[in-house]
Image (tube, rainbow, N blue to C red):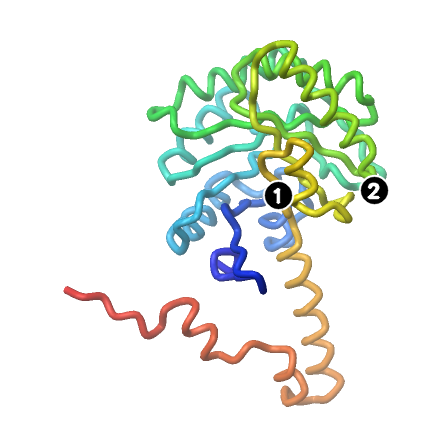
C-alpha cells in the first residue's frame, strides 16, 4: 500500500511491489527461515492485492518440494501475481544475508525441473518464474553462478535473479558481464533481476545500464518501520505522554485518506 502511494521528488513511482519473505516473517516476529504457514502468507498477499493495481512479484523462498511449489504457484496465479522468485537452495531455508549461516544448494537439473512442473501446473501461463542463483551467497564463487545461469537460460525459468552480499558490488558486475556473454553465446535472452541490499551505492539507472531488467529494494520499508516504532515507543516512555511523539507520527487523517475511510462507492 505504501509502495503504491509513494511518489519521488521527480515524480518517479515504483513499477511493481515486492512481497518479501523476510518482511513477512519479521512482521510476524519470526526469523527468515520459511516458518510462517503457507496460508498465512497467501492471506497477506491477498490483502496487498486488494489495495494496489501494481504488479506483484512474490518471494517464494525455496518453494519447498516440487508439489509444494507447484501448489504455491497455482495459488499465487489465482491471486493475480505477476512474478515468482524461487531460490536454488534446498533443505532448511536460512536468510541469505546472515553472516554465520551455511546454505545447501539444489541440483541445477532438479531445480529447473521443479520450475517446469510449476509452470505446467498453472492455468494461464501469465506468471513469470525467476530462478534466484545463490552461488555467491553460498560462497561457491562466480564460476558456479555462471554455470547455473547457463542451465537456467537453457531451461524453464522465465528470468534469473543473482544475489550477493559483496558490498563493493564487484562480483555482481563480473556476473553481469558473464551473463551478457552467456546470452550471446546461447542466443537466449532472459531478464536479470538484482537485489542490491548490500551494494546499494549503485543507482537503479546504473544497474539498468549494465543489463539489469528489474531492481528490487527488498526490505527497507520493514526496517524503517521497525526503527520508527522503536523510537516512538521510547519517546512515549521517556516523556510519559504522546505529545513529543506527534512530531514523528503521521496524522490520522493521512491514514484515513490512504485506506479510504471516506471512500464512497456509487451504486
Q: Nearer the viewer, residue 59 or 5?
A: 5
Q: Nearer the viewer, residue 114 or 237?
A: 114
* Tag 2 secondary structure: loop
Compared across the picture, whether 88 is left or right of 60 comes to: right
| Residue matched to label 1 | 216
> Residue at image x 56%, y 20%?
189
Q: Earlier in the sequence, mark 2 or mark 1?
A: 2
Quarter of the rendering occupied by the C terminus? bottom left
Q: Residues within 10 Å of mark 1 (few under 14, many from 20)?
A: some
> Residue at image x 66%, y 36%?
209
Question: Compared with residue 13, is residue 60 higher up or lower down, i.e. above or below?
Answer: above
How far from the left and from the top, in percent, is residue 197? 72, 45
- The span from disc 2 to disc 1 (Cα, nearest Å) is 16 Å
Q: Nearer the viewer, residue 211 or 91?
A: 211
Question: Compared with residue 54, is residue 132 higher up or lower down, i.e. above or below?
Answer: above
> Residue at image x 65%, y 50%?
219
How far from the left and from the top, in percent, is residue 64? 57, 27
Name the disc covering residue 167, or none.
2
Compared across the picture, whether 38 is left or right of 238 comes to: left
Residue located farthest toward the left when viewing the structure as drawn: 267
Amino acid at each position: 500500500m505504501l509502495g503504491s502511494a509513494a511518489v519521488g521528488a521527480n515524480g518517479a513511482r515504483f513499477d511493481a511491489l515486492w512481497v518479501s519473505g523476510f518482511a513477512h516473517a519479521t512482521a510476524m516476529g519470526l526469523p527468515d527461515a520459511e516458518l510462517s504457514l503457507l496460508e498465512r502468507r497467501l492471506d497477506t498477499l491477498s490483502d496487498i492485492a486488494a489495495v494496489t493495481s501494481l504488479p506483484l512479484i512474490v518471494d517464494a523462498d525455496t518453494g519447498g518440494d516440487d508439489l509444494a511449489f507447484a501448489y504455491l504457484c497455482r495459488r499465487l496465479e489465482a491471486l493475480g501475481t505477476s512474478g515468482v522468485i524461487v531460490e536454488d537452495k534446498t533443505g532448511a531455508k536460512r536468510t541469505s544475508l546472515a553472516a554465520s549461516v551455511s546454505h545447501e544448494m539444489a541440483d541445477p537439473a532438479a531445480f529447473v525441473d521443479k520450475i517446469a512442473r510449476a509452470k505446467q501446473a498453472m492455468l494461464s501461463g501469465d506468471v513469470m518464474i525467476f530462478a534466484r542463483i545463490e552461488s555467491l551467497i553460498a560462497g561457491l564463487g562466480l564460476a558456479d553462478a555462471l554455470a547455473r545461469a547457463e542451465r537456467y537460460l537453457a531451461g524453464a525459468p522465465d528470468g534469473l535473479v543473482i544475489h550477493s552480499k559483496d558490498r563493493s558490488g564487484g562480483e555482481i558486475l563480473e556476473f553481469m558481464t558473464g551473463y551478457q556473454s552467456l546470452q550471446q553465446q546461447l542466443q537466449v535472452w532472459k531478464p536479470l533481476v538484482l537485489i542490491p541490499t548490500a551494494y546499494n551505492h549503485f543507482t537503479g539507472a546504473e544497474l539498468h545500464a549494465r543489463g539489469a531488467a528489474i531492481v528490487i529494494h527488498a526490505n527497507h520499508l520493514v526496517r524503517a518501520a521497525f526503527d520508527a516504532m522503536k523510537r516512538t515507543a521510547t519517546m512515549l516512555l521517556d516523556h510519559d505522554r504522546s505529545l513529543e511523539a506527534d512530531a514523528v507520527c503521521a496524522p490520522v487523517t493521512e491514514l484515513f485518506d490512504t485506506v479510504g475511510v471516506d471512500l464512497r462507492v456509487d451504486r
